Amino acid sequence: MRVAWKHIGLLAMLACVLALFPTIVQAASEPSIVVDGKKLELSGGASVEIKDGNVIIPIRVVTENLGFRVNWDGATRGIDITDGSRLIRLTIDSKTAYVDGEEKQLLAAPALKKGVTSVPLRFVSEQMGMNVQWHAATKTAIVNRPAPPVVETPSITVDEIRVDGRQLTIAVGGKVEPKVFTMSGPDRIVIDLPGTSLSRTLEERAGQKGVVTTASAPEIANVRYALFSSNPSTVRIVMDLSSATPYQVSRGAGNEVIVELLGGTTPDPATGGETAPGIPGTDGTLPGTDGTIPGTDGSTVTPGNGSETPPVIDPEFPPVSSGKKLIVLDAGHGGKDPGTIGYSKTQEKGFNLSVVLKVQALLQNDPNMEVVLTRDNDTFIELGERGPIANRLGADAFISVHANSVENSPSASGTESYYYEEASKAFTQVMHKHLLKATGFKDRGVKKASFKVLRDTQMISVLLESGFISNPTEEAALFTEEMQQKIAQAIVDALYEYFGFSQP
């Protein structure tokens, strides 16, 4: 009897295993996606399909996991996918696609089934610079983002920056051809050293930027320096002046670059600083005004008259006052680029601009920060120019303001914030905390994404997505003065918290 019951138990267990077997086989045979070594867990019943030998993914995967922005045009059944630098335009049931305006043919057309839009994974990923591999045995699509480019550090370093009376001496570890020009409002002399980087000593002392203070010459308020550009690597040194002052540029001992203010008197070493190194003769003076030192014999001198080469930085962007943090606010899109389109046909660009103008107003007379806008009206600024504006200014932080949208999905909602470099993660987390409190929307979290405006900046940067204008409820809230003011105040509060300022 016991043997019989034992057999019955074994048969029951076998029946359960056989009943589960089709499910196990089906699960094992379903295609999956691995991005940067992490398997994607698809939510909301989304699934991966194989169509005509191509992996087809729901558009939700593109927005939530690959970090691209998607816009849906219901009138044309068109899909725009962008990473901030490249635009892919697809059309439902069409095998013709456009990448930055260039026509390309698809092996499988995008599809719209039961309200879910699906697109070919390989085409979208590879057009965005990703590597895609297909493992047939496991039915796994492996997607890897490209590694960030390695920027070689130039061998020539700026080793020392010192002020002796009315003379600035820059000790450089090799031969450089400086570019020198003047700027006004306030008056200053700018020295760019192409092909150089800051020495380890200077970096350890002040990081990528610093200030040399001096009381030896009343004309010189201070001297600022920073790694102005990483590609090509360029150190920039700025002499802040009390008024426009003539100067001359010469070579000193070794590879030193010397900028000396002309006129006036140099303080005695006992009261104003150390004796300045000897200045080479001026018999090789150049009549040109390009601000460079073409000679190599150590005797050529370029005079400055306070009104030379036009500045690299656009004149409408004012320099930051001494001691203040410079914040660059970027209102996404603008002009011919409306950004995403809302549920009620509102345009994202208008929301973005309104918010940054409110932030600017809040910080207008702030004792700790100054603000520069990449645009202050409905104009179009090339995507590739936004980050460099902040870089040229030597900004301390870059904030890009946006609103989100998902095609054919009015229920999508929430606030999310993006960073690219790890150095920006803490800044983004502080921003997100305050932004989320202001909107009261669903928390979609802090995410890492390769948006061009974030890749291009050389300081801490964040891209804020306050909410979804494709969601009628969030759209209505975001386009009110009250909500925009709350978001602007949240950005200001986050800046105060991150930089450790006391609220006025």
Image: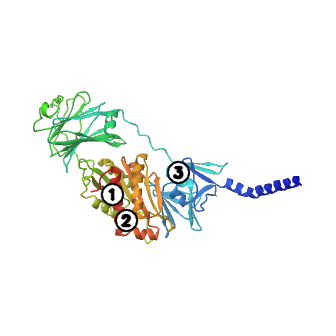
Q: Could you say which is closer to the camera, residue 121 or residue 308? A: 121
Q: Secondary structure at mark 3?
A: helix
Image quarter hosting the C terminus? bottom left
Callouts 2 and 1 close, C-beta under 8 Å: no
Label 1 crowd bin: few (<14), some (14–19), many (20+), radius 10 Å = some
Q: Could you say which is closer to the camera, residue 123 or residue 405? A: 405
Q: Earlier in the sequence, mark 1 or mark 3?
A: 3
Image quarter hosting the N terminus? bottom right
> Tag count in the figure?
3
**Can see residue 232?**
yes
Spatial separation of the CA atoms under disc 3 and disc 2: 32 Å
Residue at 41% from the left image edge and 57% from the top image edge = 433
Residue located beneath label 2 in the image: 351
**Can see residue 302?**
no
Q: Could you say which is closer to the camera, residue 345 or residue 396? A: 396
Residue located beneath label 3 in the image: 126
Callouts 1 and 3 close, C-beta under 8 Å: no
Residue type pointed to by label 2: Phe
Instruction: Residue 213: name its quadrant.
Output: top left
Residue 75 placed where, x, y %? 49, 70
Residue at 13% from the left image edge and 38% from the top image edge = 262
Residue type pointed to by label 3: Glu
Residue type pointed to by label 1: Val
